[in-house]
């Protein structure tokens, strides 16, 4: 699992519903009722999801494509339980009357969140909305806003890491209804026709492969980080040991230099010592002479007492 807690929030990201910033690629969304989209984004129900931290997003659209706009926490796939791990949550979301949408995400401290965060920091991919629509003649009217997912190629190129309407495969939510989801809504495979069943099974395989890939890459990244940390630690210890050895060598050299004196012959040292002794004797005699008291004469020629 990821461990870093720093820099997990994006800056406020902005894009305009009327401008996909694409001329030749992506899917045209000029048939969407954007005023309904604006009202839906600012609706109390949508804002409550944001404020409560429950507007979760996934890495890729496959989870919603297969298991609906509000997927369960875990699902059985090929006989094993698969945890549908979200990657981030939307922490701010607004839209003005001109179609300018501002949102902010916080990547979760798990493998999917850390993987999406690294893609975001590398400026790979961007955010793509998950929205239900109703068809009214040729126009699409948004009927449910479920947040964002992080995808490699968002339809709105200005909604990237430094989107908006996702444009992925969709399966009708109810075959007899005019309302549809751009992603599959957790419909049981056995209720689908052959082509839809194949699509659902492929989505499940993609989900399992994607989560396995994310977890493997994050585990490898953690091993690399641990190895780099150990290498850095060993390098620090080696530098410290080298400095200690250099200091010890300098101190040994200094002690050796302090012990070295001028080389002199024994005769010269003896001569200097004899001269010193003579000087000391001469000084002692001079001192004795200075300390001897003078003689006194007594009365009538007798010596003084």
Image (cartoon, rainbow, N blue to C red):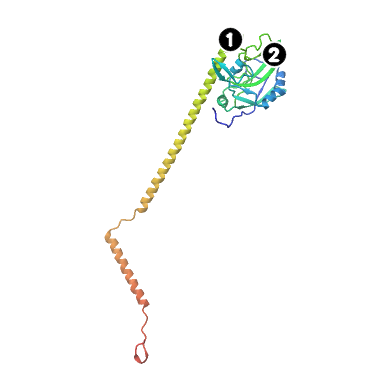
Residue 84 place in picture, x, y as percent? 58, 20
Q: Can you say which quadrant of the picture contains the N terminus?
A: top right
Q: Is residue 121 left or right of residue 178?
A: left
Relative to 122, say whether 249 is above or below: below
Element under disc 2: strand
The reply to whether discs 2 and 1 touch (Cβ–Cβ < 8 Å) is no
Which residue does the image show at 27% across and 61% down from the upper left?
Answer: 267
Q: Which mark is residue 168?
A: none
Q: Can you say which quadrant of the picture contains the C terminus?
A: bottom left
Nearer-the-camera pick, 8 or 296: 8
Q: Is residue 141 left or right of residue 71?
A: right
Nearer-the-camera pick, 70 or 283: 70
Give whichever of discs 2 and 1 has the lower sequence position: 2
Q: Which residue is mark 1?
A: 197
Q: Is residue 60 left or right of residue 288?
A: right
Which residue does the image show at 35% across and 75% down from the upper left?
Answer: 288
Q: Is residue 275 left or right of residue 241?
A: left
């Amino acid at each position: 699992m990821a461990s870093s807690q720093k820099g997990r929030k994006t800056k406020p990201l902005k894009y305009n519903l009327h401008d996909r910033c694409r001329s030749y690629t992506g899917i045209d969304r000029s048939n969407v009722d954007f005023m309904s989209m604006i009202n839906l984004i600012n609706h109390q129900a949508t804002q409550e999801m944001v404020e409560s931290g429950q507007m979760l997003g996934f890495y890729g659209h496959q989870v919603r494509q297969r298991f609906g706009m509000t997927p369960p926490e875990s699902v059985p796939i090929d006989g094993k339980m698969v945890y549908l791990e979200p990657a981030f949550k939307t922490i701010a979301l607004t839209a003005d009357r001109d179609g300018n949408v501002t949102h902010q995400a916080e990547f979760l401290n798990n493998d999917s969140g850390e993987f999406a965060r690294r893609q975001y920091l590398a400026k790979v991919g961007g955010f793509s909305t998950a929205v239900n629509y109703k068809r009214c003649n040729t126009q699409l009217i948004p009927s449910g806003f479920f947040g964002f997912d992080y995808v490699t190629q968002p339809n709105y190129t200005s909604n990237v890491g430094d989107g908006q309407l996702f444009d992925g495969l969709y399966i009708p939510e109810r075959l007899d209804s005019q309302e549809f989801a751009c992603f599959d809504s957790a419909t049981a495979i056995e209720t689908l026709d052959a082509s839809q069943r194949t699509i659902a099974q492929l989505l499940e395989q993609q989900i399992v492969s994607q989560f396995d890939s994310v977890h493997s890459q994050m585990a490898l990244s953690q091993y690399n980080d641990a190895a780099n940390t150990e290498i850095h630690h060993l390098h620090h210890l080696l530098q410290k040991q080298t400095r200690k050895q250099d200091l010890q060598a300098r101190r040994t050299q200094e002690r050796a230099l302090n012990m070295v004196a001028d080389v002199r012959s024994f005769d010269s040292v003896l001569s200097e010592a004899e001269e010193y002794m003579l000087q000391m004797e001469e000084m002692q005699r001079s001192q004795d002479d200075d300390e001897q008291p003078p003689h006194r004469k007594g009365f009538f020629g007798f010596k003084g007492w």
